[in-house]
Amino acid sequence: MDNEIDYLVADENCKQAIKELMFDANRLKWLKKYRRLYEKVKLSPKELPNVANANFNGVVYGFIKDFHKEYSLVLLEIKN
C-alpha cells in the first residue's frame, strides 16, 4: 500500500471482512476469501512474526489492525 487511498480502501474492506466473520460459521471459507486482503495488510519482517500494516503518516487504521488480528487467530484455530 502506497498512499492514503490504499489504506482507506483496505480499512473499509477489513471492516466488511470482520462483519462477515461474525455471521459466517464457515471459517475456512472466510480464510480463503480474505487471504489476499490479509497478504496486503501484513508486514513480514525477516525472521519475525508478521504484523499489521495499519499505520500511514501517523494515522492508525483500526479495522486493518483488527482484521489482521482476527485473521491470524482464525488461521491458528484452523491449524490446531
Image (cartoon, grey):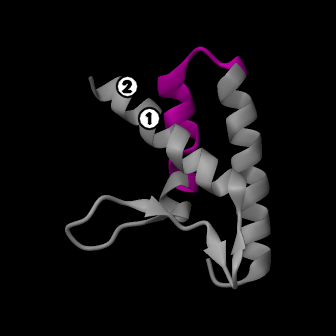
Q: Is residue 7 left or right of residue 78?
A: right
Along the line of sight, the residue nearer the viewer: 52 or 9: 52
Find residue 12 and report its image quarter: bottom right
Q: Residue furthest top?
A: 25
Mark drawn on residue 3:
none
Q: Is residue 15 above or below residue 31?
A: below
The residue type indicated by label 1 comes to Leu
Q: Name the residue located 50 percent from the left edge and 35 percent from the top edge.
A: 31
Q: Quadrant of the N terminus?
A: bottom right
Task: Name the residue rendered at 45%, 31% in the picture.
Answer: 74
- Seen from this angle, which residue lies furthest left? 47
Identify the amino acid type marked 2: Glu
Query: Which region is colored magenta?
Result: 23-37
Question: Relative to 80, does residue 25 appear above or below in the rendering?
Answer: above
Name the quadrant containing residue 61.
Answer: bottom right
Disc 2 element: helix
Where does label 2 land, which residue?
Answer: 77
- Can residue 61 be found in the magenta stretch? no
Q: Disc 1 to disc 2, how far (Cα)? A: 6 Å
User: Is the magenta region chiefly helix, strand or loop?
Assistant: helix
- Residue 16 spot, x, y in % from top left: 76, 41
Q: Residues within 10 Å of mark 1 (few under 14, many from 20)?
A: few
Tell me the quadrant of the picture where the C terminus can be found: top left
Question: Taking 33 as reference, is 6 above or below it?
Answer: below
**Mark 2 Cα within 10 Å, few/some/many (few <14, many 20+)?**
few
Q: Which residue is mark 1?
A: 73
Q: Are marks 1 and 2 in contact (CB under 8 Å)?
A: yes
Is 64 on the left or on the right of 4, as rendered?
left
